[in-house]
Amino acid sequence: MRKSKKYIIIFLATFLTFSVIPEKVEARHLDFLDDIKFPVDNIKSHFYDDWKERRGGGSRLHEGLDVRAPKGAKIVAVAEGIINTVAFSESSGYYIAIDHMNGWLSLYVHLNDDVIGDDNAGGSAAAFAKEYKRGDRVQRGEVIGFVGNSGNAEGTVPHLHFELKYLGNSQDVYEYILKAWNRYEKAKLFPKNTMSLLIY
């Protein structure tokens, strides 16, 4: 009898552990997401819901949102915060992360590293809007970098890998990014006929 109780307890613990993993955002401070800006300032931006798509030949799941845009398009901070990381890695290329001081951190990956006529010769000067360092404060909508395809995105269509983490865990925020895009698009296309400029 004791053995069967032990197995029941193990089963329940395992079930509860896996059943609480959210497929959608279940974090706090969701009002923060309602006010974020679209991360790329370019009307030719294109994206779809590619959260958890299989990448790397099926070896990993995509934990972000890819926003395709012309190379060199402006990348903006989605909300006010403090620079957490400015770096380069072989896989991510040039990237920057902003701590929004409420549990949320935004991550901007595969920034530009090219100059006209010379691929990969631009370095960090082509990636970032200025020489950011950890602890620098940025404002909502501030230009922080430029769209490219550095890192393992080399040879792909220029895009921004955008990611929002809550307490270190990547979250599915597609619906919030879509809302931010709709606000952005209306403000850009119909500036005289919309109040979006006041809230965007």
Image (spheres, grey):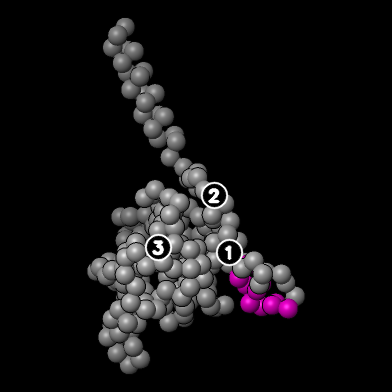
Quarter-wise, where is residue 149 in the image?
bottom left
Give yes or no for residue 190 being in the magenta stretch.
yes
Which region is colored magenta? 183-192
Q: Residue furthest right?
A: 193
Q: How many marks?
A: 3
The three-letter amino acid code for the residue at tag 2 is Leu
The three-letter amino acid code for the residue at tag 3 is Ile
- What residue sits right under mark 3 in the picture? 82
The three-letter amino acid code for the residue at tag 1 is Ala
Nearest the camera: 12 or 132? Answer: 132
Q: CA gap, disc 3 to disc 2? A: 19 Å
Residue at image location 48% in from the left, 73% down from the top:
142
Secondary element at image label 3: strand
Report the side of 143 relative to 155 (left or right).
Answer: right
Quarter-wise, where is residue 54 in the image?
bottom left
- What residue sits right under mark 2 in the picture? 30
Q: CA gap, disc 2 to disc 1? A: 14 Å
Q: Nearer the viewer, mark 2 or mark 1?
A: 2
- Can you tell which mark lies on residue 180? 1
Q: CA gap, disc 1 to disc 3? A: 21 Å
User: Sequence-wise, which precedes: disc 2 or disc 1?
Assistant: 2
Disc 3 packing (10 Å; few <14; some 14–19; many ≥20)? some
The prevailing secondary structure element of the residues shown in magenta is helix
Disc 1 packing (10 Å; few <14; some 14–19; many ≥20)? many
Give yes or no for residue 191 being in the magenta stretch.
yes
Residue at image location 43% in from the left, 54% down from the top:
101
Q: Position of residue 121 (x, y in %)?
A: 27, 86
Q: Position of residue 19 (x, y in %)?
A: 44, 34
Q: Is residue 105 above or below residue 194?
A: above
Residue at image location 31% in from the left, 16% down from the top:
6
User: Sequence-wise, which precedes: disc 1 or disc 3?
Assistant: 3
Q: Position of residue 176 (x, y in %)?
A: 56, 57
